[in-house]
């Protein structure tokens, strides 16, 4: 993402302009192992100082858009997820539901 340059507002002659760029990562969350009967919050994600976002199955995969490199991202996967099928629920096997996991965006996939 372009941040700034040192160029003048008006260029009237050949001029060297130096630009500064910042690394951004496209932050997405997905799941595996659930089906359309899954109900309730699957994962809660906090990006930087923003309020936590509760993400349901119907919203996955969820794309937070581009996040600055170095931004702290914290997520917690639900240990159990309800089902619309009577007597059925889903249990998280990987990663563990607790404690909340913290990472810095990079080229990786976060799964619940």
Image (cartoon, grey):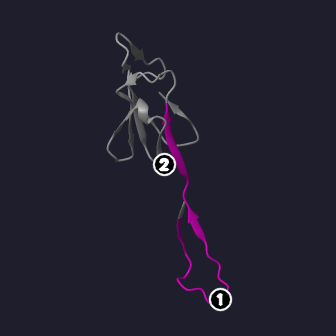
Expressed as whole percent of the image width and height from the top left, the position of residue 69 reads: 51, 49
Q: Residue at x 50, y 21 (%)?
A: 33
- Separation of disc 2 and disc 1 at Cα? 39 Å
Q: Residue at x 54, y 82 (%)?
A: 8
Expressed as whole percent of the image width and height from the top left, the position of residue 35 reads: 47, 22
Q: Residue at x 47, y 27 (%)?
A: 112
Position of residue 99 relative to residue 29, above or below, is: above
Position of residue 86 relative to residue 55, above or below, is: above
Q: Which residue is mark 2?
A: 65
Q: Nearer the viewer, residue 76 or 82?
A: 82
In the picture, residue 54 is in which quadrant?
top left
Expressed as whole percent of the image width and height from the top left, the position of residue 95 reads: 47, 23
Q: Which residue is mark 1?
A: 13
Q: Nearer the viewer, residue 71 or 52?
A: 52
In the picture, residue 83 is in which quadrant?
top left
Q: Nearer the viewer, residue 103 or 32?
A: 32
**Screen quadrant of the N terminus:** bottom right
Whether residue 12 is in magenta: the answer is: yes
Q: Secondary structure at mark 2?
A: strand
Can residue 98 be seen in this snapshot?
Answer: no
Q: Residue at x 65, y 89 (%)?
A: 13
Mark toward the start of the polypeptide (2 vs 1):
1
Q: Callout 1: 10 Å neighbours few (<14), some, many (20+)?
A: few
* Residue at the bottom extreme, as displayed: 12
Residue bounds of the magenta highlight: 3-30
Q: Secondary structure at mark 1?
A: loop
* Residue at the right extreme, as displayed: 14
């Amino acid at each position: 993402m372009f941040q700034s340059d040192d160029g003048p507002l008006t260029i009237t002659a050949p001029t060297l302009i130096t630009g500064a760029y910042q690394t951004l990562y496209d932050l997405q969350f997905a799941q595996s192992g659930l089906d359309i009967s899954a109900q309730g919050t699957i994962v809660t994600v906090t990006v930087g100082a923003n309020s936590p976002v509760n993400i349901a199955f119907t919203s996955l995969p969820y794309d937070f858009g581009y996040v600055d490199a170095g931004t702290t991202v914290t997520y917690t996967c639900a240990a159990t997820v309800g089902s619309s099928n009577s007597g059925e629920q889903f249990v998280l096997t990987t990663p563990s539901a607790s404690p909340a996991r913290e990472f810095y965006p990079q080229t990786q996939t976060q799964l619940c």
